[in-house]
Amino acid sequence: MWIYVGILVALLYAIYKEREALGCDTFSFIKACNNHKGNVMRGNVGEEGDTNEELLNKIEDTSDYTKRFVRWRKNFILSTMSIVMLWFVLFKKLPSEWEMVSGILVLFVMLSASDSFYDYHVIKPNSDNIKNSVRIIRKSQ
């Protein structure tokens, strides 16, 4: 029973922190978050009056957006919710504590591996291309 309580507390904490990182002022599933106040976009939105150097800094900073969010929280939330839903659909019951913990771990590892794969093969090369373009622009000024 205590394992369920621990997982529930960890899940609620992860959801709270994830919504906070997305720019939500309150813990509400109804109210939309203000993305511009979230960790990923805060300070990176170009504005009228920004100098070229400030805009280039914001472009470069935006290209590294994945470094400003916590992947383990997202993976934990998805793993936990997926295991519970999967068990309800397949077996019409909650998973046992052992099934819950092992299922969360398996899905968590799979999601983390997927994140790493796409980060290395898609996100990092694109970020490097953006940084290279910014470097070329700076050099030409």
Image: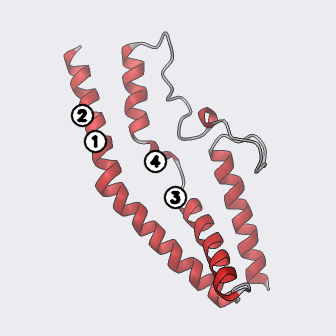
Q: CA separation, marks 3 and 4?
A: 9 Å
Residue in the foreground of this view, choosing between 12 and 29: 29
Crowd band around label 1 with a 10 angstrom C-alpha radius: few (<14), some (14–19), many (20+) = some
Q: Secondary structure at mark 2?
A: helix
Q: CA separation, marks 1 and 3?
A: 20 Å
Q: Secondary structure at mark 4?
A: helix
Residue 72 is marked as none
* Rendered residue at 24%/13% (across/down): 141
- Residue marked by disc 4: 67
Say whether marks 4 and 2 touch (CB < 8 Å).
no
Q: Amino acid at mark 2?
A: Asn
Say whether marks 2 and 1 touch (CB < 8 Å).
yes
Residue 117 lies in what quarter of the image?
bottom left
Percent x, y for residue 49? 49, 9
Q: Amino acid at mark 3?
A: Arg
Q: CA separation, marks 2 and 1?
A: 6 Å
Residue 132 is marked as 2
Taking the view exactly as shown, the residue that stands out farthest to the top is 49
Percent x, y for residue 84? 67, 77
Q: CA separation, marks 3 and 2?
A: 26 Å
Q: Earlier in the sequence, mark 1 or mark 3?
A: 3
Q: CA separation, marks 1 and 4?
A: 14 Å
Say whether marks 1 and 3 touch (CB < 8 Å).
no
Q: Amino acid at mark 1?
A: Asp
Q: CA separation, marks 4 and 2?
A: 18 Å
Q: Earlier in the sequence, mark 3 or mark 2?
A: 3
Residue in the foreground of this view, choosing between 125 and 6: 125
Q: Earlier in the sequence, mark 1 or mark 4?
A: 4
- Residue marked by disc 1: 128
- Residue marked by disc 3: 71
On screen, residue 28 versus residue 22, left or right, reads: right
Image quadrant holding the N terminus, namely bottom right
